[in-house]
Image (spheres, coloured by chain):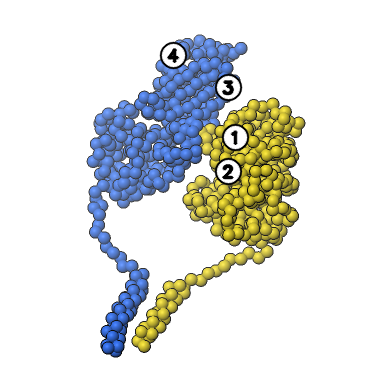
Chain colours: A yellow, B blue
Amino acid sequence: MIKTGFVQFAWLFAACFLLLNSGCVKVEYSKIDDPAYLRVFNNLNYVQTLGSKDNKVPFFCMLINPVLDANGIPTSAEIVGDFLDQRDAYAPPYPSHIGTSTSVNNPEYPGKENVLVGPILNGFDLSSWAQVPSGKIRIMFAYRPKNTVPFFQLENQLKKDILIDTVLNLTSKEVYTLHILQKDFVTKRTGLLLREEIFQKLPLSDSLTYVNFYNMSAKGYWEADKSLKAEDYLMASFQGGMKDEMNVFLSLYEDQSILSARAATIPGFKGKYIANVKLNTATSDVSPYVSFPIWASNTTNGITTNMWQRFDFFVPGMDISNNPFYEASIDNGGNWVSVNCLQNGKVRMTSNDNAVILPNLLVNIHSGVNNPKTFATVNTVEVVNGRVYLTTIQRKYAPPIY
Amino acid sequence: MKKLNNVKHSKPVLQIGKMLFALAMALQLLFFTGCKHDDLSVALPNENIRPAADFIKNNYEMRLFYAALKKTGYTEQLNGAGPFTVFVPTDEAFNRQGIYSTTDFDKMNVDSLKKIIGYHILPRKLMVDDMPSNGIDIRYATLTGPELYLSRAAFNPNGGVENELYIDGVEVIRKDVVLANGVLHLLDNVMKPNYNKTVQQWLAEHADYSVFVKGLKKFNLWDQLATGVTFTIFAPNNKALENVGITDVSLNTLEVDQYLGDRLFGAYILYDRHFFISDSQVFSLINSNGAYNYFLKNDSHYMNFGGGKLYPEFKLGYGLTLRSGNTVSDVILNSATSNLTAKNDNLCSNGIVHHLVDGLVRPDQAIKK
């Protein structure tokens, strides 16, 4: 009898204890009515060199619907995307850089920002798109010093330098990517490009990988003298830029553990023409998506494939069969640039090669009994001046089978 | 028997229960009192052990800096509340400026000495960890007012950790010496700020460069040096120009229209850039490339500039190589290596002047064709 009483008392005590210790938390959920989904990239890239050490670093704070004081200095904003750095070569399907990074610098918005993000829309995971209010929004990009002090805590004189201050009109439930771009290499004019994405509206197959191409370089970049361009050996043939109109050729290689562009290709996929890409920084047209089968190789078992992709960009009239350049030639006057997509993009080729290396378009990951299993994705390859970027969008995959 | 057993059994259980209950109550008591923070008084550390000025006084490597502090009356301030960051040039650094004994400061103007010494002190505590990684030309206000330039090589993006720090082009040879009222960093050289002087005024005041100045004036390159544009000047002294056959006398006979002034004297001017020699070293650490190549202004000739820690002393120096163009087949006119670290990095209001030990262009290499 005493024992039961004691147990009851102990339970009561535990419950009181729990209540006392957890009862004070009040969670306020934020909510945006009628959101649009926005992802922002800062394409103004820079390399820290001796010659450019005095140049202004394109490191921004994004302010949506800012509140200005009497002197025109922003005092607050509805949405703040601080520490917006130049974009990374690879924009992964999921903002995975949150978990591994210790820096405040954000290679994209929302990226590391802890904000409301998009849902899974028609089978696309929009974790990398932030919810923003739809309708007319005022957006501002302010230069900020490269340090870790939040924008609004900076001294007033450091908050005055605004690169862009404009109004965008966003439609509810639409998916947008916003690019800060250099539009003219000679005058250094910059601007925005807002693209309304359509991938979530397309009927796409699960066994095809999709990719589209953009050339968002500044006008006059490829024509400009080499001494005016940033040197970056990792950008190989892309350093000098590419011409305003290019044809894209796809090669699929059998095995990404062989780090050579001379290795075996999949029959039917060696230098296959897939797309034409024209320089465009003015209109927000979506380039058509082209596709290739993920089970193209004869050696695959339909669960996993080890193939990788190479894209050669040639000036019209030139292709893989009449290419006059030596295979490792990186200074081709903008006539030929190439990119290899294999492994995690952090490898070096062992063969003589002129390609930039980016991660594989296919996602190979442990799923249920299969380790790894290959999944198809939707991708965008963007060329900006002397750089090339890959954005991979993740589709909602079938649940793992155990 | 059964009953007895029961009694025997239940008693310890009850006791354990009571103990548990008491323990739980005690725990709860702890939880509720745990949030109360009384101001604990910790035994005071010996705060007098090393305020900045006393610390400097007690280090014989910093004897001359202490003498300068005493002469300029900073000692009392530096022993005060702070916080301070003191960049202390070693005695050896002062020796390189021709200052060997404490009495040498007596020959100097106290006001200008005070300005320079104050430039070595920041009214804040600045540890290496507070400085941005790979930050270039980060500016901090000094006690005297004008800002100093700080560059820190912390890592190479292609891999590797670096740990070098330069203030106004001077290497910090010992970092983060903690003081009671701040922090101290040891410098390899004396910083040479020239506040309101332009590079033109600086050159005019140094008789050692009189032939160079005369040449600049003769070829109409002199007036621009007083403007707001930025310059890096590699100034050859009179001895250096004599090596390439230019003297005060020979300049008088040079016909201005027969020579390319932008090559003959313009070769020593780098426009629109301000480079400390250390910048080259910092960029070679953080970017694997410390060189800067450029065409001379209004000329087809091409200059390679590169600096770093030179063999065999591993002190900062720089090299200039002048070529007739930027292709491999172009000939080298001349190249010069300048390793007198202490004479470089004269910071002026519109640029920086470095000392050059050898001339680059002979008059016959700059004849108009």
Between marks 3 and 4, how big is the CA–CA gap? 25 Å
Can residue A263 be seen from the camera position used here? yes
Badge 3: chain ID: B
Between marks 2 and 4, how big is the CA–CA gap? 59 Å
A294 is higher (above) or lower (below) than B243: below
B5 is higher (above) or lower (below) than B60: below
The residue drawn where x is 62% and y is 49% is A304
The image shows residue B238 at horizontal and vertical percentages of 42, 17
Badge 1: chain ID: A
In this orientation, which residue lies closer to the viewer: A313 or B332?
Answer: A313
Q: Circle 4 sits on which residue?
A: B243
Badge 2: chain ID: A
User: SS of the residue at dot 3?
Assistant: loop
A394 is higher (above) or lower (below) than B164: below
Q: Circle 3 sits on which residue?
A: B326
Foreground mark, 3 or 4, reads 3
The residue drawn where x is 49% and y is 40% is B157
In this orientation, which residue lies closer to the viewer: B153 or B301?
Answer: B153
Q: Circle 1 sits on which residue?
A: A260
The answer to whether the residues at label 3 and label 2 have Cβ atoms under 8 Å apart is no
Task: Assess disc 3: are there few (<14), some (14-19) or many (≥20) residues with their C-alpha within 10 Å of its C-alpha.
Answer: some
User: SS of the residue at dot 1?
Assistant: loop
Foreground mark, 3 or 2, reads 2
The residue drawn where x is 52% and y is 20% is B322
Quadrant of residue B18 in the image?
bottom left
Q: Circle 2 sits on which residue?
A: A343
Labels 3 and 4 in the same subunit: yes
Labels 2 and 4 in the same subunit: no
In this orientation, which residue lies closer to the viewer: A138 or A247?
Answer: A247
Labels 4 and 1 in the same subunit: no
